[in-house]
């Protein structure tokens, strides 16, 4: 597993090494396609859709997760506290369906995607997925006309949807070696104009705000049984993570004082379709995103929630911007 692409690429993208340089011709081609597509929207050859409520896009500019989904959930919680009635739209990355559909708490992750399902279960808000995010927004607003703001989970590069606020999330990787895919991790050139830059890691670019990620002090299994992490100290435990950067989850577990006997770093959005349903010899810890799929096969696995503490200045600045979007 150590030589799989999801392990090798982050190493290649961390510096301007020989392998990255060999990939630069492909990056140049990627950049040309990117700019042609961008110009098509800027010049009106491709149309952008404006929805009747404000749209907040939470995304990133690097391949792989940077903590967008926890930020999305933190934002909708904040919106609720401020009196907004938010809904969430997403493409539903990794799902097998291609239609426009609502996400229910008991939806199958293969039909709606793991991240939209997690958001639905954690927030209990309307969540819709569609290949085109604007279609998800139209359907959500029709089904829930009380919704007065939409938060789009991912989609900074989805220009067919008009947005009012762009929030770019970056983790400790920053922009890596600063090159476009595939020689580097960038989906689009940086710097770019965004309304807010939110750092979830220590390697921060100039400007922006900071959010501190840490694990909760407890875990929960598929039957809702809570277990404190302190009760798992001084015994070996296993851990798995189907993330872009699984080692980040394992480090957070070790920071809690846990002894990891075995770790399984799985590809992002791993579906667990072939996962064996067997008795566990040791406690098995996983992320919340993995749990929505793993619990169908291993309900005794323990999901450890991730908490996000965003600096207050971010919320103040966001509220000021949102205030200007409120209908008179």
Image (cartoon, helix red, strand yellow):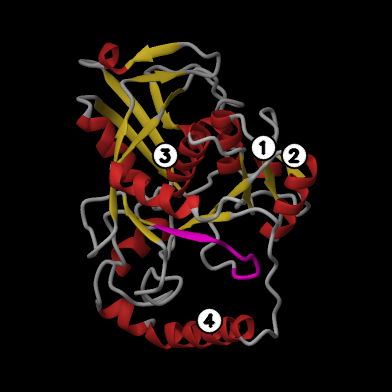
- Disc number lying in front (2 or 3): 2
Q: Secondary structure at mark 4?
A: helix
Q: Position of residue 23 (x, y in %)?
A: 39, 81
Distance from disc 2 to disc 1, alpha carbons, whole Å, reads: 8 Å
* Label 2–label 1 contact, CB within 8 A: yes
**Crowd tier of the residue under label 2, counting other residues whose Cα lies within 10 Å: few below 14, some 14–19, many 20 or above:** some
Q: CA distance from mark 2 to mark 3?
A: 34 Å
Relative height, residue 21 to residue 217 (above, below): below
Q: Residue at x 55, y 85 (%)?
A: 33
Label 1 – label 4 distance at C-alpha? 32 Å
**Picture coordinates of residue 64 (x, y %)?**
43, 57
- The residue carrying mark 3 is 241
Nearest-to-viewer mark from 2 and 4: 2
Mark 2 vs mark 3: which is more N-terminal?
2
For label 3, the SS is strand
Q: From mark 3 to mark 1, how far is it between C-alphas? A: 27 Å
Q: Which mark is residue 126?
A: 1
Closer-to-camera residue (116/242): 116
The image position of residue 294, as x and y in percent, is: 54, 30
Left or right of residue 37, residue 187 in this image:
left
Q: Which mark is residue 175?
A: none
């Amino acid at each position: 597993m150590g030589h799989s692409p999801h392990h090798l690429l982050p190493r290649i993208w961390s510096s301007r090494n020989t392998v990255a340089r060999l990939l630069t011709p492909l990056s140049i081609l990627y950049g040309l396609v990117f700019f042609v597509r961008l110009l098509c929207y800027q010049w009106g050859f491709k149309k952008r859709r404006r929805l009747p409520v404000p749209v907040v896009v939470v995304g990133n500019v690097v391949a792989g997760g940077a903590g967008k989904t926890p930020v999305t959930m933190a934002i909708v919680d904040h919106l609720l506290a401020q009196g907004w009635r938010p809904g969430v739209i997403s493409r539903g990355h990794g799902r097998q369906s291609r239609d426009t559909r609502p996400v229910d708490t008991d939806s199958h992750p293969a039909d709606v995607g793991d991240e939209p399902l997690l958001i639905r279960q954690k927030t209990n808000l309307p969540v819709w997925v569609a290949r085109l995010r604007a279609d998800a927004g139209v359907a959500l607003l029709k089904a829930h006309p009380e919704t007065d703001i939409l938060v789009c989970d991912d989609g900074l590069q989805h220009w067919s949807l008009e947005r009012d606020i762009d929030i770019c999330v970056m983790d400790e990787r920053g922009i890596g070696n600063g090159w476009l895919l595939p020689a580097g991790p960038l989906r689009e050139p940086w710097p770019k104009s965004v309304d807010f830059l939110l750092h979830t890691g220590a390697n921060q670019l100039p400007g922006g705000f900071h959010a501190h990620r840490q694990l909760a002090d407890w875990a929960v299994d598929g039957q809702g049984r809570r277990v404190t992490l302190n009760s798992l100290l001084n015994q070996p435990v296993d851990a798995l993570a189907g993330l872009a950067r699984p080692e980040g989850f394992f480090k957070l577990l070790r920071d809690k004082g846990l002894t990891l006997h075995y770790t399984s770093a799985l590809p992002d959005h791993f579906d667990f379709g072939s996962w064996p349903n067997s008795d566990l010899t040791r406690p098995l810890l996983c992320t919340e995103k993995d749990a929505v799929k793993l619990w169908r096969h291993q309900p005794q696995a323990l999901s450890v929630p991730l908490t996000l503490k965003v600096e207050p200045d971010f919320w103040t600045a966001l509220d000021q911007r949102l205030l200007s979007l409120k209908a008179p």
